[in-house]
Amino acid sequence: MLSINDKHIDFFQSVYDVVRLIPEGRVTSYGAIARYLGAPRSSRMVGWAMNAAHTQSGVPAQRVVNRNGLLTGKAHFSTPTQMEELLEAEGIQVKDDRIVNFKEIFWDPSIELEL
């Protein structure tokens, strides 16, 4: 039987699995990942998983932003500008901590992936 902590670990791992599938040059939101995983009210938990993503290999955490395209997770990177720098290296434009063409490059796992 899974404990509460085991459930969180499994959820975090599922988040990381989805984030690894986000194509370079695209972004998604915490809420879109939560909806895809069948937990639409768990955006914050997705955020917590992303805050701990540095402990995982190959998780492009810079590609996960809030529902308005804001770089709300930037405080959890090595430097205050690293998230923006990583996105810009992928060709994603950022202005004032917001993805410029968010709607055009938004990647929705519920549409792009099958469960």
Image: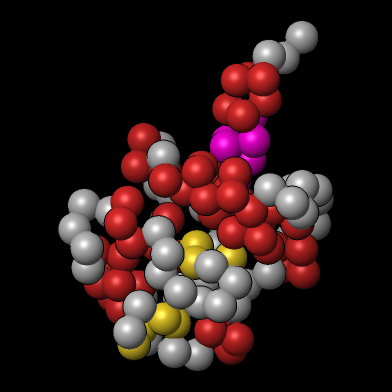
Q: Which residues are magenta?
A: 10-15
- At a point 22% along the width and 63% down the height, the residue shown is 80
Q: Quadrant of residue 73?
A: bottom left
Q: Is residue 48 at least partly visible in the picture? A: yes
Q: Could you say where residue 72 lies in the image, as x and y percent from the top left?
A: 42, 64
Q: Quadrant of residue 95?
A: bottom left
- At a point 68% along the width and 48% down the height, the residue shown is 42
- Residue 53 lies in the magenta-colored region: no
- Residue 11 lies in the magenta-colored region: yes
Q: Is residue 31 left or right of residue 68?
A: right
Judged by its main secondary structure, the magenta piece is helix
Of 47 and 85, nearer the camera is 47
- At a point 68% along the width and 69% down the height, the residue shown is 108
- Please state, as top left, top right, bottom left or bottom right, where the N terminus lies in the image: top right
- At a point 35% along the width and 42% down the height, the residue shown is 54
Q: Could you say where residue 62 lies in the image, as x and y percent from the top left?
A: 40, 62
Numbered marks: total: 0
Q: Could you say where residue 49 lies in the image, as x and y percent from the top left?
A: 51, 42
Q: Could you say where residue 81 lies in the image, as x and y percent from the top left?
A: 22, 68
Q: Give the residue furthest to the top.
A: 1
Q: Is residue 28 at least partly visible in the picture? A: no
Of 51 and 54, nearer the camera is 51
